[in-house]
């Protein structure tokens, strides 16, 4: 791990190296290639400690923050849509199918009862 007081910001010398290594991990992923499992994406190690800095965020940090916000909003809208779509399906499955089965049983037993009487 990192020492307790070290900063989490990457120096400019470290950024290109991390970017190229991250790129090489992503480019190694196969999409249904040889039939094997996809390659594992190696993410950088999360620092042990984080400090707030007085320096304003860089343009890159601001852009990355906006991208993450956008992705999270998209994800939650997809999850919300999936729940909205599942509500009528669930009602149909539990309520309507149960009523249909019970009604059919009731009607069949009523038919046999009429046949026995008549």
Image (tube, grey):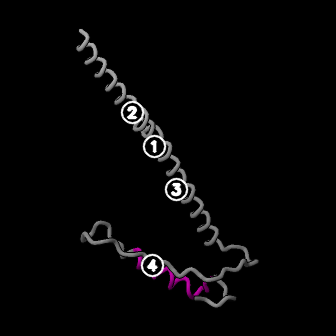
Secondary structure, mark 2, is helix
Residue that numbered label 1 is attached to: 86
Q: Magenta part of the protein: which range? A: 9-26
Q: Residue 75 bears which disc, if any?
A: 3
Secondary structure, mark 3, is helix
Where, quadrant-wise, is the C terminus in this rendering? top left
Q: What residue is rendered at 60% in x and 61% in y?
A: 69
- In this rendering, the answer to whether 54 lies above or below 91 is below
Q: Nearer the viewer, mark 3 or mark 2?
A: 2
Q: Total marks drawn?
A: 4
Circle 1 crowding by C-alpha within 10 Å: few under 14, some 14–19, many from 20: few
Residue that numbered label 2 is attached to: 98
Q: CA distance from mark 1 to mark 4?
A: 35 Å
Q: Residue 42 bears which disc, if any?
A: 4
Pick whichever of labels 1 and 4 is earlier in the sequence. 4
Q: Toward the viewer: 83 or 66?
A: 83
């Amino acid at each position: 791990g990192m020492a307790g007081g070290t900063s989490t910001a990457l120096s400019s010398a470290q950024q290109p190296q991390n970017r190229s290594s991250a790129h090489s991990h992503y480019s190694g992923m196969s999409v249904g290639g040889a039939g094997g499992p996809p390659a594992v994406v190696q993410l950088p190690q999360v620092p042990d400690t984080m400090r707030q800095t007085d320096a304003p965020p860089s343009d890159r940090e601001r852009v990355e923050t906006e991208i993450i916000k956008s992705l999270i909003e998209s994800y939650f809208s997809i999850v919300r849509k999936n729940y909205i779509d599942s509500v009528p399906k669930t009602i149909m499955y539990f309520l309507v199918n149960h009523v249909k089965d019970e009604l059919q049983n009731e009607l069949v037993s009523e038919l046999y009862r009429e046949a026995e009487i008549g």
